[in-house]
Amino acid sequence: MRRTPARRPTMKDVARRAGVSESAVSFALNDRPGVSAATRARVRRVAEQLGWQPSAAARALSGEGAATVGLVLARPARTLGVESFFLQLVSGVQEALAGRRLGLLFQVVEDVDAECAVHRRWWAEHRVDGLLVVDPRDGDPRPALLAELGLPAVIIGAPGAGTVPPGAAISTLWADDTAAMAAVVDHLHGLGHRRITHIAGLPGLAHTRRRIASLRAEAARRGLTDITSVTTDYSDAQGAEATRHVLAATRPPTALVYDNDVMAVAGLAVAAEAGLSVPGELSIVAWDDSVLCRNTHPALTALARDTAAFGRHAAEHLMALLDGAPAQSTQDTLPHLSPRGTTGPAPEGAGPVE
């Protein structure tokens, strides 16, 4: 037997139950003058009893907003299924939005141009009240576009508001990748490693460039010359390929630093294939700790932070903008290094050629 779909309660239902006109219901539920305090209270009580909720489409048409924020991710979709960072980030975002009964509209696209097109469409269709923006890039077109559209936004990962047009309702939230990389190099250098390779993420991302620059600066400060970075798409396949390539060099690195947990796990597997002892012959560090890092054998040394809290903070900053607060730039908690079983002293005779 075919079920009849449940019908959503309407303002007409509320008006009929409360014994008032539909216009009186509209005034009462939208905090507008024109009804008495007693009528307002009665209408709201009936609406709650019936489970009435405002239509997002109606809210948009009336200029009251969509009760939704947007997040567009311009990364290869195949890299998202196994990487925990964005799942944790979104869980924190959703936790914060749920407290305000705000929805999250999420879409994956191929590149930043496609992301900008989505932003324009969502703005034209009144789909979102604000945006969370990830993966800042050098020469990023998104801040100027969002300022032009007047969409409040939080850029996650931007160190300061230097690229944000003056007066725009755009906040930035970031962690210090430069200091985090310095801590990794300090740890490895203290263990005697002088040949370090960084298996980095996408080359166009601002945080990738900051990590590479920090690695080079730390190497220069210590007089190290066998320090390199190799960019990838964050996938396990490219992480493994890059690992095989650098380990096949005449003087391979004694330590590898990966820009995410997935590539680090892939690198650990490649080391096992090559018969290398970890950490006896090769040390490995992962960026962003996860369940994967803690459950490999040996467990991966990793940069740890509360990624869900990072997402929650981003959503809270966006909600503050939606409430009329001024834009701000905030540095979040610095990731801390958790040494585990994949880092140890450099093998004897692994120093640079004198």
Image (tube, helix red, strand yellow):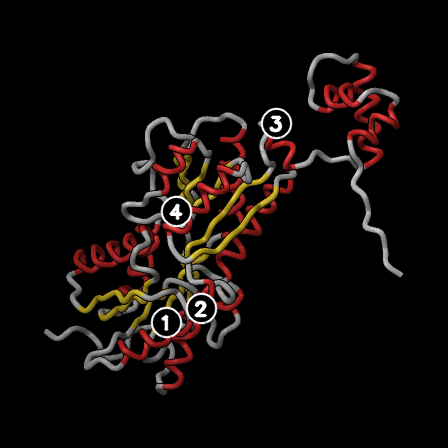
Badge 1 or badge 2: first in the primary sequence: 1
Residue type of the residue flagged with mark 4: Gly
Secondary element at image label 1: helix
Residue 336 location, quadrant: bottom left
Secondary element at image label 2: helix
Badge 1 or badge 3: first in the primary sequence: 3
Front residue of 336/86: it is 86
Q: Residue sitting at 26 percent across and 58 percent down?
A: 212
Of the residues tagged 3 and 2, which is closer to the observer? 3
Badge 2 or badge 4: first in the primary sequence: 4
Which label was assigned to residue 239?
1
> How many angstroms separate mark 2 from mark 4 (CA)?
20 Å
Q: Look at mark 4 in the image and give the residue it sits on.
A: 157
Residue density around tag 4, few if under 14, some if 14–19, many if 20 or more, within 10 Å: many
Q: Is residue 16 left or right of residue 121?
A: right
> How many angstroms separate mark 1 from mark 3 (CA)?
50 Å
Q: Residue 200's x, y, as percent?
A: 32, 63
Of the residues tagged 1 and 3, which is closer to the observer? 3
Secondary element at image label 3: loop
Report if the CB atoms under discs 3 and 2 are less than 8 Å apart: no
Which label was assigned to residue 27?
none
Which label was assigned to residue 262?
2
Residue type of the residue flagged with mark 3: Ser
Q: Look at mark 3 in the image and give the residue it sits on.
A: 62
Of the residues tagged 4 and 3, which is closer to the observer? 3
Q: Is residue 202 left or right of residue 10?
A: left
